Image (cartoon, grey):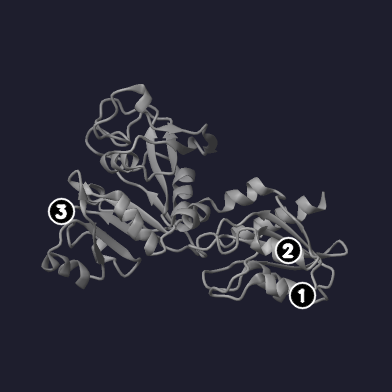
Amino acid sequence: MDDIKYMELAIQLAKQGCGWVNPNPMVGAVLVKDGTIIGKGYHEKYGGPHAEQNALMDCRSSTTNATLYVTLEPCCHHGKTPPCTEAIIRSGISRVVIGSSDPNPLVSGKSIQILRSLDIEVVEGIEKEKCDGLNESFFHYIRTRRPYVIMKYAMTMDGKIATRTGESRWITGEAARRRVHEDRHQYSAIMVGVNTVLADNPMLNCRLENCKNPKRIICDTNLRMPLKSKIVTTADVAVTLIITAITDANKHRPYIEEGCRVMVIPRKNNHIDLNSLMQRLGEEQIDSILLEGGGALNWSALKSGIVNKVHTYIAPKIFGKSEKTPVTGLGIDRLDEAFLLSKPTITQMGEDILLESKVIHCLQES
């Protein structure tokens, strides 16, 4: 079917905006007339023209009676750019084929209604599953105003994230590590606990060409992070947020002078209240977080109910005795308290495998 063929092209275009458009969605658009593509575009960066507008600007011939293929329902409200519905109407397009519906209450079905009221044919749901898959984090964020959290860890086949002496570089191979850096580019922020900083002194950056560094979020309840750590000394490389329960401004000052931001969040069970933190980060327009914490932070995140998805990289190695496991904490007492995950998708990553599952049930702490 031609509709599927052109929507597939729109999906590939949309992916080119990956990492650059947050907290907006990735969107691609293709204009077709008389069986010929006359314009293509995608949402290239946050604040820039939308995919539909870029496709129209790319067009060098008449769009009267053309068909527009777009991966997400066009917007109909004024934001950083004018409504796409207005541009569609002005262009003389007679048919619009849509992949995903937009859950944004400002749009959600309103655009389709506007177009149909003007006798523009609208076809919905073409390649819907693939189009929805482009924007998991956006859909979650627009509905909840909280970041979509992906808990990621790499482990051996006997479930260890480090040897008994603490060595962890590298458990997985090159292909898996590249995928992690692609994710660091895609998602808005990366979050770890201070113990990870103390143990590994990481940069938490993206080491691919033509990529962006994620915002760095460090959960440091008691403000223990060394001023000489790479995170602090490279605060000019990426937005660096230190999350603490310490309210003393004098203790904040050295970090602020180095270029970090300090955000005070109340304690819960003697740790950062992660639900309060998610609320604040959502207000900061952080739509997605790659959680690369150690076992303690992973447990707290699961227990708080903030984790939406789990990425588990498994390497064909065995470490034997080690207390370093992906999730520590108190653990559960009964099987019916388990954190339930969806059936995983399985991807071969060189010698390693990646399991991806959505969290479908969490027993949240009281």
Q: Which quadrant, please, contains the C terminus? A: top left
- Report the residue at 26% width, 48% height from top: 196
**Residue nearest the observer in this picture, 33 or 216:** 33
Disc 2 residue type (three-letter): Val
Circle 3 residue? 222
Side of 275 where 107 appears, left or right: right
**Residue nearest the observer in this picture, 338 or 257:** 338
Q: Are marks 2 and 1 in contact (CB under 8 Å)?
A: no
Secondary structure category for the residue under label 3: loop
- Report the residue at 32% width, 22% height from top: 334
For the question of whether residue 157 can be seen, the reply is yes
Q: CA distance from mark 3 to mark 2?
A: 52 Å
Tell which tag, 1 or 3, sits nearer the viewer. Answer: 1
Tag on residue 30?
2
User: Percent from the top left, x then y, of residue 143?
Assistant: 49, 54
Disc 1 residue type (three-letter): Ser
**Furthest residue to the right?**
34
- Mark 1, other Cα within 10 Å: few <14 / some 14–19 / many ≥20: some
Tag on residue 91?
1
User: Upstream in the sequence, badge 3 or badge 2?
Assistant: 2
Q: Are marks 1 and 3 in contact (CB under 8 Å)?
A: no
User: Upstream in the sequence, badge 2 or badge 1?
Assistant: 2
Tag on residue 209?
none
Disc 3 residue type (three-letter): Asn
Secondary structure category for the residue under label 2: strand
Side of 351 where 81 appears, left or right: right
Side of 136 where 14 appears, left or right: right
User: Percent from the top left, x then y, of residue 247?
Assistant: 15, 62
Q: Are marks 3 and 2 in contact (CB under 8 Å)?
A: no
Q: CA distance from mark 2 to mark 1?
A: 14 Å
